[in-house]
Image (tube, rainbow, N blue to C red):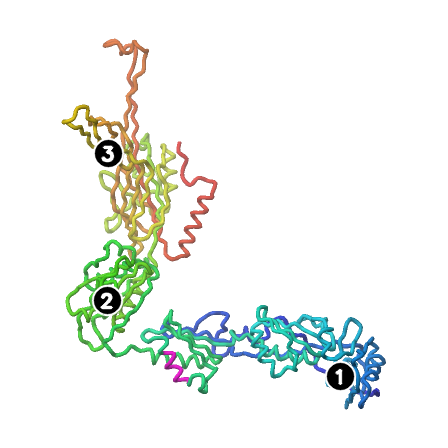
């Protein structure tokens, strides 16, 4: 070995990073394509499908781990060993030049040849010696500060395991490394590396933890890691996906036809385009590394997805999203024929209403006018739960709609509501189903909900209220409360009773506080109820009182018992409200309010109580968020009380000298106030729920304290 001067600059290397190996995985590709991670579809029509564009990059960056230097850089050295004894070479290189401790295994015999044509830096000498020894079936294993020259067969058992990603711990010579994979399976990586890795370099594959265990010299391991970095790329972000829904054709048929267009697996696009039918959605899933191919496939799907020009009927299944299948079937019957279906007519009220401010859309369009311009017989609904005839299914959880049954049954369209799955089974021709589907899309919308904030109060009429609450409002005692009459006459002052709408902003609490300033207010009930549009909300707080309606006794049997006929009557506070929301946001309320008490019977000889009722039945209309007040039901209670000297006050004619009779009277008026809040969408419903939760958790009372 002779020293020589020279200059050799090696490129800097870095250990395999822990970050994703694909440098362009988060970048936006050309032509406005979108990375898959954003999950954003193109701005295309829904019928044309959605395309999720990938980055188009499937190969990572090659990284080479550095081999730690064994000393300071110098001017370089030239190696020139020809068939030299291995022990002599080890002594010269390891002992004399590198100044490291070394051991030669007893099984190491023979000689090697090691010649360099240029000077080597100090950190290049050991890798050069390692490669020369590897050709002779030997390896250098470092253990601490000791270097051992052993046969390759023994090197694996004597080497320590080094975790990938720790360059400082990577030792020169023969070693074992654990390679964790991020984006590719360990078995697939082993298959890719078998053709380029040295024999025996891959010791084990762990599919469960997705790990590779590799062994070899520092150069061999660095080469394997370069290949791992290339293949372990984010394949999903590079791929582009297209979800193409079908309207008329079958997904399997379209996939088979598209495979003929692309040539299939054996064609020129084999491996570049993958087509999968999604039967649940009746759609085609296309996968390709080239986004342009997906644009072409979408065009071909549009060309192939056409209804057959035939009169053959098909079975379609429409899953209802926001309502009930029986309601939709009933509504379609009314639209087509103007008659009710066999389904209960009341059930149609749960269909979603048009949101305030929205314009209702036409439902069926030209359903009865086919492409040819002729006017065929209107399709009829059938009352069979199975399409195509046969006996009716018993207890199958389905409901059917029926309309005009005249004409040939073979030309009719059949719609069956499957209540168990909340779906519609439709037997129709393709062009008929397109019109029905358009109508279903507009009918199957989320129903409006109304939050009803109500208060039922009993107001004592004294002083300023001696003429009733209505005159108190008219007198201007509270500037926030005004009586209004709508243009359609929905709310108007009437006798007996009155109806007020508060338009200047006061809520129920403000009105009760205004009344409490001048009299006593007893709040009988203060419910907050969430109800669907056109449905009835009911609240009852009270008891069921048994009432004897008649007494009977047998006239043929002596000492026969008296038999009473008993009926139970609901008493207490009973409130029923049905909201109806129209297009402009006006809320029409059907209100039924009853406050009943149990009294002593004075008009009958039956031993049964008398029900004292105060009841309001009215229909009013207010805007969303406004408060309507109903009142005018006044109750006058009078009690007679006798006071005086005992015994003496009961003497006939003279008793009045020793006692007195006092008559006490109390007048109360029933006041019902309701504030409707129309809820559109899930977010507003969450806001209302959160507000109610805050009110329930507040320390301040929501309503005035009863005095």
Q: Which residues are magenta?
A: 254-262
Q: Quadrant of residue 668?
A: top left
Residue 647 makes an appearance in the image? yes
Residue 414's tag is 2
> Is the residue marked by circle 3 packed among few (<14), some (14-19), or many (20+) residues within 10 Å?
some
Percent x, y of residue 240: 47, 76
Percent x, y of residue 197: 64, 81
Q: Quadrant of the N terminus?
A: bottom right
Q: Which is nearer the eye, 642 or 459? A: 642
Residue that label 3 marks: 566
Q: Element type at marker 2?
A: strand
Q: Is residue 81 left or right of residue 660?
A: right
Q: Element type at marker 1?
A: helix
Q: Quadrant of the C terminus?
A: top left
Query: Is 259 contained in the magenta span?
Result: yes
Farthest residue to the front: give it: 107
Residue that label 1 marks: 133
Q: In the rendered view, would you say 596 is above or below 103? A: above
Q: Nearer the viewer, mark 1 or mark 3?
A: 1
Q: Earlier in the sequence, mark 2 or mark 3?
A: 2
Residue 335 makes an appearance in the image? no
Spatial separation of the CA atoms under disc 1 and disc 2: 85 Å
Q: Is residue 7 left or right of residue 318?
A: right
């Amino acid at each position: 070995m002779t020293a020589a001067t020279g200059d050799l600059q090696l490129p800097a290397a870095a250990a395999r990073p822990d970050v994703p190996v694909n440098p362009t995985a988060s970048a936006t590709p050309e032509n406005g394509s979108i990375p898959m991670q954003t999950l954003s579809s193109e701005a295309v029509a829904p019928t044309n499908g959605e395309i999720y564009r990938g980055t188009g990059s499937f190969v990572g960056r090659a990284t080479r781990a550095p081999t730690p230097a064994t000393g300071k850089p110098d001017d370089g050295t030239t190696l020139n060993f020809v068939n030299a004894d291995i022990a002599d070479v080890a002594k010269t290189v390891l002992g004399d030049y590198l100044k490291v401790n070394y051991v030669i295994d007893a099984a190491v015999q023979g000689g090697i040849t090691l010649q360099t044509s240029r000077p080597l830096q100090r950190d290049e000498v050991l890798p050069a010696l390692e490669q020369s020894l590897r050709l002779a079936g030997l390896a250098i294993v470092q253990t601490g500060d000791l270097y051992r020259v052993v046969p390759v067969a023994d090197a694996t058992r004597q080497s320590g395991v080094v975790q990938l990603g720790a360059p400082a711990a990577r030792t020169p010579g023969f070693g074992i490394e654990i390679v964790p994979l991020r984006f590719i399976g360990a078995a697939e990586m082993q298959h890719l590396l078998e053709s380029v890795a040295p024999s025996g370099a891959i010791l084990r594959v762990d599919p469960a933890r997705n790990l590779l265990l590799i062994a070899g010299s520092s150069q061999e391991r660095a080469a394997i890691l370069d290949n791992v970095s290339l293949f372990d790329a984010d394949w999903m972000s590079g791929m582009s996906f297209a979800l193409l829904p079908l309207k008329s054709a079958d997904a399997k048929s379209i996939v088979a036809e598209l495979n003929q267009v692309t040539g299939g697996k054996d064609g020129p696009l084999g491996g570049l385009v993958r087509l999968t039918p999604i039967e649940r959605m009746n759609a085609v899933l296309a996968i390709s590394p080239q986004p342009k191919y997906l644009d072409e496939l979408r065009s071909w799907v549009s060309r192939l997805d056409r209804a057959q020009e035939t009169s053959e009927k098909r079975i379609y299944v429409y899953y209802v999203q926001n309502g009930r299948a029986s309601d939709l079937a009933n509504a379609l019957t009314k639209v087509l024929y103007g008659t009710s279906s066999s389904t209960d007519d009341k059930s149609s009220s749960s269909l979603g209403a048009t949101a305030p401010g929205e314009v209702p859309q036409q439902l069926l369009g030209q359903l009865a006018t086919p492409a040819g311009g002729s006017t065929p017989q209107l399709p009829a609904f059938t009352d069979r739960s199975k399409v195509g005839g046969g006996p009716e299914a018993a207890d199958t959880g389905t409901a059917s709609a029926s309309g005009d049954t005249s004409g040939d049954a073979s030309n009719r369209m059949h719609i069956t509501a499957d209540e168990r799955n909340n779906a519609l089974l439709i037997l129709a021709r393709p062009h008929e189903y397109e019109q029905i589907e358009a109508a279903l899309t507009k009918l199957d919308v989320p129903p409006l909900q109304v939050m009803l904030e109500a208060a039922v109060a009993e107001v004592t009429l004294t002083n300023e209220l001696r003429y009733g609450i209505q005159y108190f409002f008219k007198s201007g005692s509270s500037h926030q409360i005004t009586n209004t009459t709508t243009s359609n006459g929905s709310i108007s002052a009437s006798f007996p009773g009155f109806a007020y709408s508060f338009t200047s902003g006061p809520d129920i609490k403000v009105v009760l506080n205004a009344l409490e300033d001048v009299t006593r207010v007893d709040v009988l009930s203060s419910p907050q109820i969430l109800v669907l549009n056109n449905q009835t909300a009911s609240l009852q707080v009270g008891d069921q009182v048994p009432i004897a309606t008649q007494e009977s006794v047998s006239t043929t049997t002596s000492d026969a018992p008296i038999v009473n006929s008993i009926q139970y009557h609901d008493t207490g506070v009973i409130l029923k409200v049905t909201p109806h929301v129209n297009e402009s946001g006006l809320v029409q309320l059907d209100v039924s309010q009853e406050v009943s008490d149990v009294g002593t019977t004075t008009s009958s000889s039956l031993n049964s109580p008398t029900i004292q009722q105060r009841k309001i039945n009215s229909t009013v209309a207010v805007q969303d968020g406004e408060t309507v007040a109903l009142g005018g039901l006044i109750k006058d209670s009078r009690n007679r009380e006798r006071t005086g000297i005992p015994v003496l006050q009961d003497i006939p004619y003279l008793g009045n000298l020793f006692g007195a009779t006092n008559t006490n009277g109390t007048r109360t008026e029933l006041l019902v106030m309701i504030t409707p809040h129309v809820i559109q969408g899930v977010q507003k419903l969450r806001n209302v729920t959160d507000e109610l939760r805050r009110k329930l958790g507040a320390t301040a009372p929501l309503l005035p304290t009863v005095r």
